[in-house]
Image (cartoon, rainbow, N blue to C red):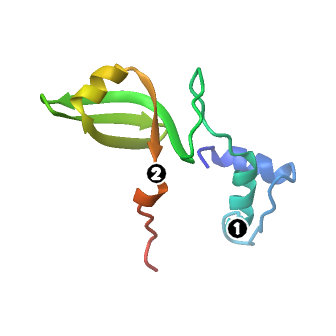
Amino acid sequence: MGVSDDTVRRLVADGQLSAVHPVNGPLSIDGAELAQWLRERAKAPQLEGGVASSARNKLVGLVTEVRSDPVMSQVEMQAGPFRVVSLMSTEAVEELGLKPGVLATAVIKSTNVVIETRQM
C-alpha cells in the first residue's frame, strides 16, 4: 500500500477497512477487500500537459541514470519504491531529454508484464 502500519490501523479504526484481531497475532485484513479498497482510490498519474493513452500501467518517477552508446541507451528511473529500467534508442533519449533528475512516466504495455507470486 505504501503507507505506514499506523495509517493502516487508523483506516481500520475509522471503519474504512475491516480487520480481524486475533488474540495472539497481528491485525489481519482480507486481501480481496484491500484490493477493492485500493482500486477504488487509484488515480492514474499525470504529468503536466496530460497525454491520452490506451496503456493503463503507468509509473511516474525520476530518472536516476542514463547509460548510452551511439545506438542504444539504458534508462533507469525510481517510481516510488520501484526501480524501472528501460532500453531504448539513444536518439529517443536525446529527443525526450532524459537525464538524471528529469521527471518521466514509464508506460508498461500489459502484454509484456510478468507477474510472480511466492510458492507456498
Tell me: 9 left or right of 96. Answer: right
Q: How far apart are marks 1 and 2 (CA)?
A: 25 Å
**Residue type marked 2:** Lys
Q: In which quarter of the image is residue 51?
A: top right
Residue projecting furthest to the right: 15
Question: Is 59 positioned to the left or the right of 101 in the image?
Answer: right
- Coordinates of residue 89 in the picture (x, y in percent): 24, 34
Instruction: Tell me where residue 7 sits by quadrant.
Output: top right
Q: Is residue 30 above or below residue 80?
A: below
Using the image as rendered, state which of residue 119 and residue 67 is in the foreground.
Answer: 67
Up-down relation of residue 60 to residue 58 (above or below): above
Q: Residue at x 32, y 35 (%)?
A: 76
The answer, for residue 99, to whether it is visible in the render is no
User: Looking at the image, which residue sits at the far left?
Assistant: 70
Mark 1, secondary structure of its residue: helix
Q: Nearer the viewer, residue 11 or 21?
A: 11
Mark 1 touching mark 2, by CB under 8 A? no
Residue that label 1 marks: 32
Q: Which residue does the image show at 38% across and 42% down from the upper left?
A: 83
Mark number displayed over residue 8 = none
Expressed as whole percent of the image width and height from the top left, the position of residue 4 reads 63, 44
Q: Nearer the viewer, residue 37 or 23?
A: 37
Q: How dense is the environment of label 2, judged by Cα within 10 Å: few (below 14), some, or many (20 and up)?
A: few
Q: Where is residue 55 in the image (x, y as percent from the top left)?
A: 54, 46
Amino acid at pointer 1: Ala
Mark with earlier residue (1, 2): 1
Count of labels shown? 2
Q: Position of residue 20 (x, y in %)?
A: 77, 68
Q: Does the image show residue 41?
A: yes
Q: Circle 2 sits on which residue?
A: 109
User: Looking at the image, which residue is at 34% across and 19% down?
Assistant: 97
